[in-house]
Image (tube, rainbow, N blue to C red):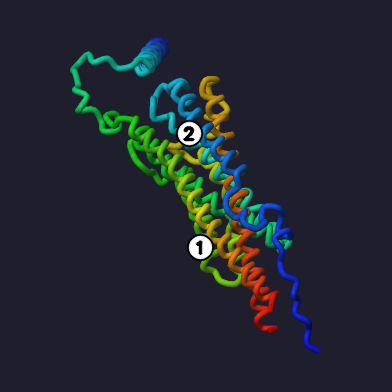
């Protein structure tokens, strides 16, 4: 019986410790033990997000416009070729 | 008895109203629509994105999502269009399906490039690395490479390259569902597919407007690219007609 009571108390303590640790993880860690300068943060946390967002946004500007420009050039080239061919065929018809 | 050569010259009217003389350049309507979409995508949506709520753990960098995910959806859509057009070309052998397959493959590469460039920009901040060889990223890269291969085969494959390109596009299409569900099946750093349906109201509207803008942009580019192929086909027909004439005379 004594063993059972001990086991129950031990389980309750372990459970309580787990719950406490879980609730502590949910809260943001306050600087209680030491103050850490921002320059000593991991590199991922130091990296500013704005340049990355601007770079991504520039990609969405740039790629479709470059593609549209190449498309326009290709269409203009085919247009020239078609007019040239029609002229030549018109000349051939006259002969 | 020698067969009589067909002297019927291809006329622009046989290829539809867009192929009439001097209209190979982008039409006014297409430009107007392009400007409207440009205004929607590049002027209005950034404001909406700026006003959308910040995600709790990623903050500002999560806003790349509003362009990254819609370009991914458009890439998937384009892969489906290319694959279906490729299958139709393989079975029916009609040149219009081949032209559509080529146009959609090219756009899959374009939108895929957007996904593959913007993803690492987001990942660098969110995960601390530019790239990770996990299931979603690797399968997306493979999908993109399949469509690059499709374009290379079309360009340098010689005779029969169209059919081979169509088959590659069909394989690329089959890959799309695997890329989509990869985040749910394998352990990966990439957000799961449940992210989009569970978006907060402030994020949801912005996301779907961006997606709509991308799909409209895609449709516009697809029709323009397919038109270019029609013009090229017409030029080839005219070259053949000219050769026949010179042979006959």
Residue B16 in percent (x, y) is at: 71, 55
Instruction: Give yes or no for contact between labels 2 and 1 (Cβ–Cβ under 8 Å).
Output: no
Q: CA distance from mark 2 to mark 1?
A: 32 Å
**Relative to the observer, which residue lies in front, A38 or A90?**
A90
**Chain assignment, label 2:** B
Which label was assigned to residue B42?
2
**Chain assignment, label 1:** B
Q: Is residue A92 above or below residue B47?
A: below
Q: Residue B135, can we see it? A: no
**Relative to the observer, which residue lies in front, B116 or A50?**
A50
**Which part of the image, by quadrant, shows the N terminus of chain B?**
bottom right
Q: Residue B110, can we see it? A: yes
Mark 1 or mark 2, which is nearer the start of the sequence?
A: 2
**Relative to the observer, which residue lies in front, B234 or B123?**
B234
Residue A69 in percent (x, y) is at: 48, 50
The residue most toward the right is B1
The residue under label 1 is B152
Q: Residue at x 75, y 71 (%)?
A: B8
Circle 1 packing at 10 Å, graded few (<14), some (14-19), many (20+), is few
């Amino acid at each position: 019986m004594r063993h059972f009571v001990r086991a129950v108390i031990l389980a309750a303590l372990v459970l309580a410790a787990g719950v406490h640790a879980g609730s502590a993880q949910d809260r943001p860690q306050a600087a209680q033990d030491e103050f850490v300068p921002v320059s000593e943060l991991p590199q991922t946390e130091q990296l500013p997000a704005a340049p990355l967002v601007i770079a991504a946004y520039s990609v969405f500007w740039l790629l479709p416009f470059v593609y549209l420009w190449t498309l326009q050039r290709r269409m203009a080239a085919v247009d020239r070729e078609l007019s040239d061919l029609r002229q030549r065929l018109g000349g051939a018809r006259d002969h | 008895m020698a067969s009589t050569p067909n002297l019927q010259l291809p006329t622009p009217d046989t290829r539809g109203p867009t192929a009439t003389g001097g209209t190979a350049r982008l039409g006014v309507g297409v430009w107007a629509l392009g400007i409207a979409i440009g205004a929607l995508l590049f002027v209005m949506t950034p404001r909406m994105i700026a006003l959308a709520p910040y995600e709790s753990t990623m903050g500002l960098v999560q806003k790349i999502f509003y362009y990254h995910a819609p370009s991914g959806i458009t890439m998937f859509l384009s892969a489906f269009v290319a694959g279906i057009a490729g299958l139709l070309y393989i079975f029916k052998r009609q040149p219009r399906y081949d032209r559509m397959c080529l146009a959609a493959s090219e756009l899959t590469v374009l939108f895929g490039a957007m996904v593959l460039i913007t993803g690492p920009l987001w990942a660098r901040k969110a995960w601390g690395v530019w790239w990770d060889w996990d299931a979603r990223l690797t399968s997306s890269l493979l999908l993109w490479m399949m469509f690059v291969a499709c374009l290379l085969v079309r360009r340098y494959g010689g005779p029969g390259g169209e059919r081979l390109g169509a088959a590659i596009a069909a394989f690329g299409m089959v890959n799309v569902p695997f890329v989509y569900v990869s985040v749910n099946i394998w352990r990966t750093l990439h957000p799961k597919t449940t992210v989009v349906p569970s978006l907060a109201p402030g994020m949801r509207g912005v996301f779907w407007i961006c997606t709509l803008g991308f799909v409209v942009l895609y449709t516009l580019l697809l029709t323009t690219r397919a038109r270019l192929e029609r013009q090229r086909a017409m030029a080839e027909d005219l070259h053949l007609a000219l050769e026949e004439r010179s042979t006959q005379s």
